[in-house]
């Protein structure tokens, strides 16, 4: 059996001998104050981050129309906001398609052949709506 005096202690993982040397010479109270100061700074950053997130959630709540919007969880508010964006995108696509069709109709009506023989509607464009699209 080995004598306990001769057993070499292992250094904790992630701790270098340089770190131990720096800590050995300082009083425990000084280390506690430094740790507390670092913790206070980290807590302040986290508080600001959470306040920023909460402000964003409140902004979304103001946009969404729901009778009990203030009672919904943050996750539910985010999901409802995503659904709202998808619905708006769908409406925008429908309006852009209708706008395209109406532009083509106007073009046909003012075309010299429009009063003689009506032309069928062309299919809507394959690419997303752009004001530069031509019929």
Image (cartoon, rainbow, N blue to C red):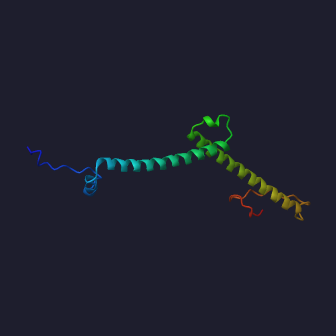
Q: Residue at x 68, y 58 (%)?
A: 128
How many discs appear? 0
Q: In the image, residue 129 lies at what x, y percent?
A: 71, 58
Check the image and report above or below for 73 versus 85.
Answer: above
Check the image and report above or below for 118 versus 83.
Answer: below
Q: Which of the two residues, 120 or 14, is positioned nearer the viewer here?
A: 14
Residue 43 shown left or right of residue 34 in the figure: right
Q: Which of the two residues, 89 or 13, is positioned nearer the viewer here?
A: 13
Q: In the image, residue 111 lies at what x, y percent?
A: 87, 64
Quadrant where the image shows the N terminus: top left
Q: Which of the two residues, 49 or 69, is positioned nearer the viewer here?
A: 49
Quadrant where the image shows the C terminus: bottom right
Q: Residue at x 66, y 43 (%)?
A: 62
The answer to which quarter of the image holds residue 84 is top right
Q: Residue at x 60, y 36 (%)?
A: 72
Q: Residue at x 74, y 62 (%)?
A: 131
Q: In the image, residue 104 lies at what x, y percent?
A: 81, 59
Check the image and report above or below for 85 versus 105.
Answer: above
């Amino acid at each position: 059996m080995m004598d306990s005096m001769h057993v070499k202690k292992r250094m904790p993982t992630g701790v270098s001998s340089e770190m131990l040397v720096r800590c050995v010479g300082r009083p425990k109270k000084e280390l506690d104050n430094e740790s507390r100061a670092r913790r206070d700074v980290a807590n302040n950053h986290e508080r600001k981050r959470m306040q920023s997130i909460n402000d964003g959630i409140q902004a979304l709540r103001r946009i969404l129309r729901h009778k009990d919007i203030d009672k919904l969880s943050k996750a539910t508010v985010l999901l409802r906001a995503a659904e709202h964006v998808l619905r708006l995108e769908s409406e925008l696509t429908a309006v852009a398609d209708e706008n395209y069709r109406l532009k083509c109709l106007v073009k046909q009506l003012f075309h010299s052949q429009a009063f003689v023989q009506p032309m069928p509607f062309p299919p809507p464009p394959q690419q997303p709506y752009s004001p530069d699209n031509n019929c």
